[in-house]
Image: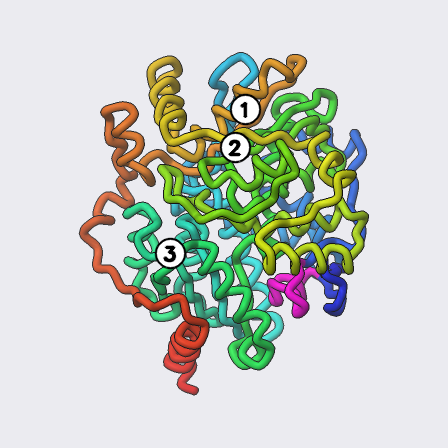
């Protein structure tokens, strides 16, 4: 299996190369050169298998000769051993055709653990075999950072620096990052938005001398390995509901497009996903694109669902590459115009192709609170604001679904967003016992301006302290 950049100017790599590189040198994102596909018989053979086995089998289609399935199974068993549910990703029926796929039973109570715990194992295995060391830099709107830190803390061959927007995550999200005092972990609160943090990370990767000096790698969903490790949970849920002999729809609350892209990849591999449904908050660039081909940037507006407070959805570039017939030159010029002008000129034919499969819904803060309240009252189910947006979007789609079950990605434990849940229900969800002292733990982080030079200096200083360079 080989990987190419969406912008066509970076050398092709194998899976290990993509894992360690993260972002391509030309600023593009890596994509498989060809798509693996499973037959209906192969999908059926996965029914009823433990989650780790499903994950290893599907990820092996992307690792190729780099990592055999037997090694992937060993890594997957370690990655998911500590999850709070024996099912790893349990499926909960909310209504006759609406199901919550709970992806928050990992160590940081968010869906990012599903991929990040696997990435930690992959990095450890590959780096040990190659005798190398990397510096992981990442941007987070709340959940990626804590999941990456938890997966990579105390690992000898990895330094981790996570950028988060100052004051724009929930307190639980921030403390899950800043109270990890392991020497290989450093947190930076950037005076700006998540998009600013993401731009800083991309700028570090395109600064070739700095990238080489620091041996940069990425854990954001710009890293293809993250997407590959998210595909299995959609397959696991769809198989439980009768796939491949029964089609399903998938609803995802999304900001950076990585989670919904993983569902698109599962469909591209042959899983019968008939519809992808995107739930957006007031930062609704993706919903506006789907409804009227309006992919235009606006100011990031804080909301009750801060992990979705994003205007530049990085992973959309991967879908755009496919919609443009894998034309790397057209993809590169479209993305360059988007960053220069704040609006993405997607050809009508490509836009219409996207809307035939993907549907978008915008859910306001008020409607989010009402959905949390309704679920608690009618179903006895407690949802965080992001999951509530996904459920509201999934329900809005139901009149058109022809009896097809809708799988909603339940992306975070309600205790990660206790203020919103309490406002909606009057009940403040407690943290699990293993995190009960979170508010009492010491925090450690730096506050820096949105300035590439100062951020790079902080990264360099952290790495040199840890390596003695």
Mark 3 vs mark 2: which is more N-terminal?
A: 3
Work out whether mark 2 precedes mark 1 in sequence or the reverse, and give the earlier one: 2
Q: CA distance from mark 2 to mark 1?
A: 8 Å
Q: Which residues are magenta?
A: 15-29
Q: Quadrant of the C terminus?
A: bottom left
Return the x and y of residue 430 as percentages of the image width and height: 25, 35
Crowd tier of the residue under label 1, counting other residues whose Cα lies within 10 Å: few below 14, some 14–19, many 20 or above: many
Residue sitting nearer the eye, 151 or 337: 337
- Number of labelled discs? 3
Marks 1 and 3 sit apart, C-alpha to C-alpha, by 29 Å
Mark nearer the viewer, 1 or 3: 3
Instruction: Identify the residue shown where x is 37% and y is 56%.
Output: 165
Q: Which residue is mark 2?
A: 279
Residue that carries the numbered disc 1 in the rendered image: 394
Q: Is residue 73 visible?
A: no
- Image marks 2 and 1: residues in contact by CB distance under 8 Å: yes
Residue bearing mark 3: 165
Quadrant where the image shows the N terminus: bottom right
Q: Is residue 400 above or below residue 333?
A: above
Q: Is residue 181 left or right of residue 257?
A: left
* Secondary structure at numbered mark 2: strand
Return the mark for residue 114: none
| Residue at position x 45%, y 52% in the image | 144
Q: Position of residue 37 (x, y in %)?
A: 79, 41
- Whether residue 199 can be seen here: yes
């Amino acid at each position: 299996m080989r990987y190419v950049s969406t912008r066509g100017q970076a050398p092709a790599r194998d899976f290990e190369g993509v894992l360690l590189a993260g972002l391509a040198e030309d600023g593009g994102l890596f994509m498989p050169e060809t798509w693996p596909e499973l037959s209906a018989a192969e999908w059926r053979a996965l029914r009823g298998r433990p989650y780790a086995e499903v994950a290893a089998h599907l990820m092996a289609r992307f690792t190729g000769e780099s990592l055999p399935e037997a090694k992937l199974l060993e890594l997957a068993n370690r990655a998911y051993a500590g999850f709070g549910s024996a099912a790893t990703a349990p499926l909960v029926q909310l209504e006759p055709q609406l199901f919550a796929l709970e992806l928050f039973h990992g160590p940081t109570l968010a869906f990012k653990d599903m991929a990040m715990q696997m990435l930690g194992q992959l990095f450890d295995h590959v780096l040990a075999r190659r005798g190398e060391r990397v510096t992981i830099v990442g941007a987070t709107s709340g959940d990626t950072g804590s999941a990456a830190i938890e997966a990579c803390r105390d690992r000898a061959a990895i330094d981790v620096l996570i950028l988060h927007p100052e004051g724009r995550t929930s307190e639980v999200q921030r403390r899950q990052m800043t109270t990890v005092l392991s020497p290989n972990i450093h947190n930076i609160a950037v005076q700006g938005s998540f998009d600013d943090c993401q731009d800083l990370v991309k700028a570090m990767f395109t600064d070739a001398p700095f990238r080489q000096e620091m041996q940069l790698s990425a854990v954001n969903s710009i890293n293809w390995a993250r997407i590959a490790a998210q595909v299995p949970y959609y397959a696991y849920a769809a198989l439980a509901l009768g796939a491949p002999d029964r089609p399903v729809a998938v609803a995802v609350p999304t900001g950076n497009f990585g989670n919904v892209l993983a569902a698109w990849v599962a469909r591209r591999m042959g899983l019968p996903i008939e519809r992808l449904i995107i739930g957006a908050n007031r930062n609704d660039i993706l919903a506006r694109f789907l409804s009227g081909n309006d992919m235009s940037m606006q100011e990031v507006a804080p909301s009750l669902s801060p992990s979705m407070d994003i205007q530049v959805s990085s992973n959309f570039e991967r879908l755009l590459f496919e919609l443009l017939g894998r034309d790397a030159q057209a993809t590169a010029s479209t993305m360059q115009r988007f960053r220069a002008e704040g609006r993405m000129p997607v050809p009508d034919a490509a836009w219409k192709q996207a809307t035939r499969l993907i549907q978008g819904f915008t859910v306001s803060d008020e409607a989010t609170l009402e959905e949390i309240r309704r679920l608690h009252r009618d179903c006895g189910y407690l949802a965080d604001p992001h999951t509530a947006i996904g459920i509201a979007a999934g329900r809005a789609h139901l009149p058109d679904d022809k009896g097809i079950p809708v799988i909603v990605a339940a992306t975070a434990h309600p205790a990660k967003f206790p203020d919103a849940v309490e406002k909606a229900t009057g009940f403040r969800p407690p943290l699990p016992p293993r995190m009960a002292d979170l508010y009492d733990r010491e925090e450690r982080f730096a506050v820096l301006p949105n300035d590439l030079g100062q951020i790079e200096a902080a990264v360099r200083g952290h790495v040199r302290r840890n390596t003695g360079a």
